[in-house]
Image (cartoon, helix red, strand yellow):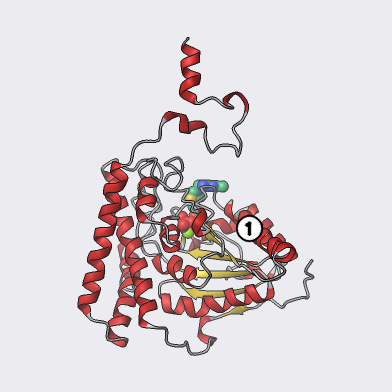
Amino acid sequence: MATMTKTSPKTTPPSTAAKPTRLPSETLQQWLRYMLLIREFEVRCMQAYQNKKIVGFCHVYIGQEAVAVGCTAAVKPDDPIITAYRDHGHALARGMDPKYCMAEMFGKIGGCAKGKGGSMHMFDKTHWLFGGHGIVGAQTPLGAGLAFATKYIDEVINGGKSKKVTLAFLGDGALNQGAFHEALNLAGLFDLPVIFCVENNGYSMGTAISRGTTMGHDITSKAIGYGMDSAVVDGMDILKLYEHFKPVVDKARETSRPAFVDIRTYRYKGHSMSDPRKYRTKEEEQNYEAEDPIDRLATTLMADYQWPREKYDEMIKEVRDQVRESVEWADASPEPPIDELYKDVYVEEWGPYKGTSLPEMLREQKD
Ligand SMILES: Cc1ncc(C[n+]2csc(CCOP(=O)(O)OP(=O)(O)O)c2C)c(N)n1
Ligand SMILES: [Mg+2]
């Protein structure tokens, strides 16, 4: 178990980092494609919501694309990831086929959770994505638990050859939840390789963090109390994000210690589909949109890597087609049959439902 003197927590301001190595053009193109995919996916979700193809809660990720794509790029494909309810971006960045993601949005059987979870519950076992959670902060102790499990398996079964790092994403609003503090405390005590990635978009629903919603002016001060390193990173510029986030991941893997990262970002749209955003000015939104993470990366590729404009147009078209196809696929996917209601609730079928499907039970009841 760790002692508080083991590491001296410190905050790393982005400006002090060494000059980044030039990443290959292909890597940047891949990131751009993922960011475009998320943006287009979300735009189509908003349309589908207005057309009542998607119902219930729906929180889109537009503006925050660089965070999911950049952070995911900094870990290995089999490092666990867990997040809150603004989760479509993480699922797509992790490699979920957009058709499974869209079918989940539509509540169809073809969805990643057979249409039983919807927007807030994207799960993908093959891509090590553990949700998608609707209760603010609830995923943070689960993130610590994932790190505990991977560390235990690595040390006890794999002889230290499979060190993993878990990314636990949360919003700035989750900083005030008790579960978050319990998770940080245990992660610090048990030396858990988990990074608490705060997607600090400045708002918890309609309340701005700048109004003083959480104690400590610099949110990284929370990490100090739990004996872990922290960093502040720019979430609107994927190159800067990767440059500062990757060393945090590498260190967590090497030292098996947790870390806390304040990722500065912005959501362009409302908290959810029913939010008219009256609590902030158009000017504020336009200022962020002028620094758009997708435009920024595309500009870098074209200006610094001589990537042709036609290739960008081609990429946009391919992504649009892919998302349109995913909408069509989701639309065509059937509704979940009624006996799905009692499946996937317990590992083993339980109680009165054991061995009997719901339609059979209803039939029996009628007789
Ligand atoms: C425990 C709990 N309290 C309240 C809510 C209602 N609620 C849903 S989202 C939200 C705001 C969270 O904001 P933040 O964590 O910053 O995430 P963001 O929406 O900005 O991504 C609240 C209060 C909830 N889902 N769970
Ligand atoms: Mg927020």
Is 312 situated left or right of 64 in this image?
A: left
On the image, the x and y values in percent for residue 342 come to 52, 31
Q: Of residues 4 and 204, which is closer to you in this image?
A: 4
Residue plotted at (32% across, 82% down): 300
Where, by quadrant of the figure, is residue 288 drawn? bottom left
Q: Of residues 110 and 220, which is closer to you in this image?
A: 110
Is 273 situated left or right of 14 in this image?
A: left
Q: Of residues 125 and 214, which is closer to you in this image?
A: 125
Residue plotted at (26% across, 69% down): 315
The quadrant of the image that shows the N terminus is bottom right
Q: Is residue 281 visible?
A: no
Q: Residue furthest top?
A: 367
Residue plotted at (65% across, 59% down): 144
Helix, strand or loop under label 1 = helix
Three-letter residue code for mark 1? Leu
**Residue 49 versus residue 257 in the image, above or below:** above
Where, by quadrant of the figure, is residue 165 drawn? bottom right
Q: Residues within 10 Å of mark 1 (few under 14, many from 20)?
A: many
Residue plotted at (36% across, 36% down): 335
**Residue bearing the label numbered 1:** 146
On the image, the x and y values in percent for residue 189 come to 75, 64
Q: Of residues 190 and 100, which is closer to you in this image?
A: 100
Q: Residue furthest bottom?
A: 19
On the image, the x and y values in percent for residue 120 come to 46, 48
On the image, the x and y values in percent for residue 257 come to 68, 71
Q: Label 1 CB, ligand 1: below 8 Å?
A: no
